[in-house]
Image (spheres, rainbow, N blue to C red):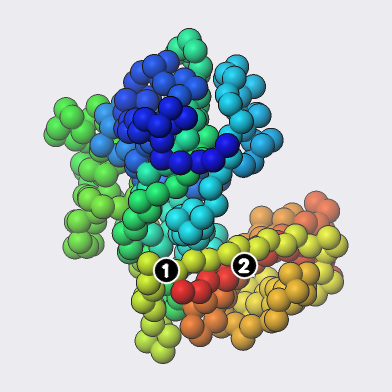
Amino acid sequence: MAVTAHTQTGTPTPSVDVCQLTRNPGLYIGKQVAVSGRVTQGFEDFSVRDEHCTSFQNRVTLAYGDMKENVEYWKHFFHVELPDTTFLDDSEAKHLKDLLRAFRVFAPNGDECGPERCSFFRVSATLTGRFIAKKSANTNYIGSCCVLIIERVSGVNTTRTEVPFGSVYRCEEQEWHPTATETTDLANSDSQTVSRDPRAARLHMFSRIAQHWHDPDIADGNPEIGTGGWTSPDLLRRYTIRQIGKAEGPIVTRQVCRASADLPPKEISPDFGCSHKYWQESSPSQASPQPSEEPKLASVARNAISAAMASWHTPLPDLVVNVCKQESDGNSGYGQCSFTTQDGTVSVWVELVRWQKREKHAQWTGIPWTSRVRGAFCSQ
């Protein structure tokens, strides 16, 4: 079946926004529709959304029409029959895929990162395809209400985010131990609207934390659901709150990262794109640095990178260390190192883990590491 902007009868494909689809999915089941919105792709998430939609369900899950196993899964999941689908993998589609893969593999502070927080672009597009959903509403189901099987991509548009490209960073931390009065002030809200909206309440709290350090406002930042922290859009400022006990109260940490003057961030164009590769070590490395020896940890990480590059049949680039850090709890050790090339086009994040028997305690000599490597290879 040829994929065009028209239905088989020659009539134009109807344009439907995300809100219409999620509020009344039954009206469009099995139909070909054109949907415009912000496209995101991350861990277990490939979707188009409308951030102005007030509905709880403001996104539609996506699947490419030529990925037959995936299409069959969704047809079976929703119990919907569809005509055979195809996918027009033209220049627009390739451009969309490149942009969705354009993200940092590590944050400036060295933590592992991905498209959810570290994308270089906000991407929007018009997606034409077949819509499927459950025929009867299920109020107990909290996943995606519906899926669009993409047959064609058009109107790809991008906006550069504040996420920096390239460079290496040095980060500093400060702690604040709020008094009982300050703790109460952080927790309280004057606005009923804020108190009814968990996200607004957290932003309200972090706004007060920013005021403590006389920092810029945090309105455009990202509250972190998993850690309970907040990160600025450029990833260079972060607040976390740690509760150490009812009597002691919380500890608030402020982390600020700054780019190296010798290796500043680079500009990138909308034609920019990245490919990503992954490698998992099959057997532990015998090189075992002692705790707190960052140069030796970096050496182990570089050995893992060499093995990964060899498995990818990719020349080993000249990499500069961004951050290496590690911690242990007596019976397990964890380290991570981040690297980049001078021009930023290759960046690598390495995770190192090791374990020991409980009776050995903190005697780490001779205990090997296992490693996992993520690499991003970018060009424009």
Foreground residue among 254 and 91: 91
Q: Position of residue 162 (x, y in %)?
A: 32, 64
Q: Residue under circle 1?
A: 271
Q: Residue at x 18, y 29 (%)?
A: 193
Residue 33 point in image, percent of width and height: 40, 31
Q: Is residue 90 visible?
A: yes
Q: Residue at x 83, y 53 (%)?
A: 357
Q: Position of residue 339 (x, y in %)?
A: 57, 75
Q: Nearer the viewer, mark 1 or mark 2?
A: 1
- Residue at the location (14% across, 34% down)? 190
Residue 348 placement, left or right of 10: right
Does 340 sit above or below residue 53?
A: below
Instruction: Locate residue 334: give its quadrant.
Output: bottom right
Q: Is residue 249 visible?
A: no
Query: In the displayed image of the protein, which residue is found farthest to the top?
Result: 136
Q: CA distance from mark 1 to mark 2?
A: 20 Å
Q: Nearer the viewer, residue 256 or 253?
A: 256
Q: Dot 1, crowdedness within 10 Å: few (<14), some or many (≥20)?
A: few
Residue 332 percent location from the top left of the image? 72, 56
**331 or 41: nearer the viewer:** 41
In the image, 273 versus 8, the foreground residue is 8
- Tell me the element at label 2: strand
Pointer 2 local density, CA inside 10 Å: few below 14, some 14–19, many at least 20: many
- Extreme residue toward the left, this view: 190
Q: Hey, which quadrant is residue 325 in on the image?
A: bottom right
Q: Secondary structure at mark 1?
A: loop
Q: Are marks 1 and 2 in contact (CB under 8 Å)?
A: no
**Rendered view: 336 above or below 264:** above
Q: Which mark is residue 232?
A: none
Query: Which amino acid type is marked by label 1?
Result: Asp
Identified at 64% across, 83% down, the residue is 317
Disc sitting over residue 375 in the figure: 2
